[in-house]
Amino acid sequence: MLAQNDEEHAVPEGLRSRFQAVVAAFVAGDFQLARHELNGVAQIEADTARFIEEQIAAYGARLVPLSEKVWQRSVYRWMDGWWEFLIDLSTDEEAVSDLVLHAKLFGGLQGRIEVWSVHVP
């Protein structure tokens, strides 16, 4: 069950594999999520995908699959209609980098995830 209040909460274990799959697609160069079958994850529009790719490139380190350490800082929060997720990303230089994946979840644990950005907040 996801909390619906103003507090930040740890990302539930049941959602972590979905975010890991999104990042794995990014690592493989699929920033639109068009070449990967990701259950319950919306494809990303070309302009947004290009922005995400540029932000990762500008960071200066290579993106790698998520380290287990990212779950110590990654959070979600209810936003009055959806849950907002901030997932810290891993690079070849940092298990937990300053790069953050920003996503919305609609419809609960099995709902649709929409990635809308990757950037350093």
Image (cartoon, rainbow, N blue to C red):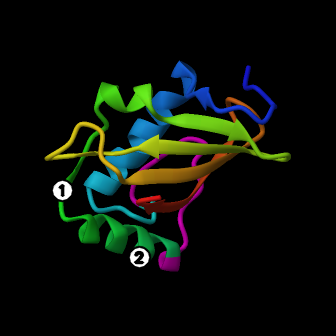
In the depicted structure, whether residue 32 falls above or below residue 15: below
Give the magenta-colored segment's residue range: 35-47
Q: Position of residue 35 (x, y in %)?
A: 39, 59
Cα–Cα gap, marks 2 and 1: 16 Å
Picture residue at 37% right of the left edge, 33% below the top: 70
Q: In the displayed structure, does residue 100 sit left or right of residue 94?
A: right
Residue 50: which disc? 2
Q: Amino acid at mark 1?
A: Arg
Q: Quadrant of the N terminus?
A: top right
SS state under label 2: helix
Q: Position of residue 91 (x, y in %)?
A: 22, 47
Extreme residue in the left direction: 93
Q: 15 or 33: nearer the eye?
A: 15
In the depicted structure, whether residue 75 falls above or below residue 60: above
Q: 24 or 76: nearer the eye?
A: 76
Q: Position of residue 52 (x, y in %)?
A: 41, 67
In the depicted structure, whether residue 50 falls above or below residue 67: below
Picture residue at 48% right of the left edge, 35% below the top: 74
Tags 2 and 1 in contact by the CB under 8 Å rule? no
Total marks placed: 2
Q: In the displayed structure, does residue 16 sit left or right of residue 5?
A: left
Q: Which residue is mark 1?
A: 62
- Residue 8 belongs to magenta span: no
When asked about the image quadrant of residue 50, the answer is: bottom left
Q: 76 or 39: nearer the eye?
A: 76
Nearest to N terminus: mark 2 or mark 1: 2
SS state under label 1: loop
Q: Position of residue 44 (x, y in %)?
A: 53, 65
Q: In the displayed structure, does residue 53 sit left or right of residue 12?
A: left
Q: Would you call the spot at circle 1 few (<14 residues within 10 Å), some (14-19), or many (20 or more)?
A: few
- Residue 45 belongs to magenta span: yes
Q: Amino acid at mark 2?
A: Arg
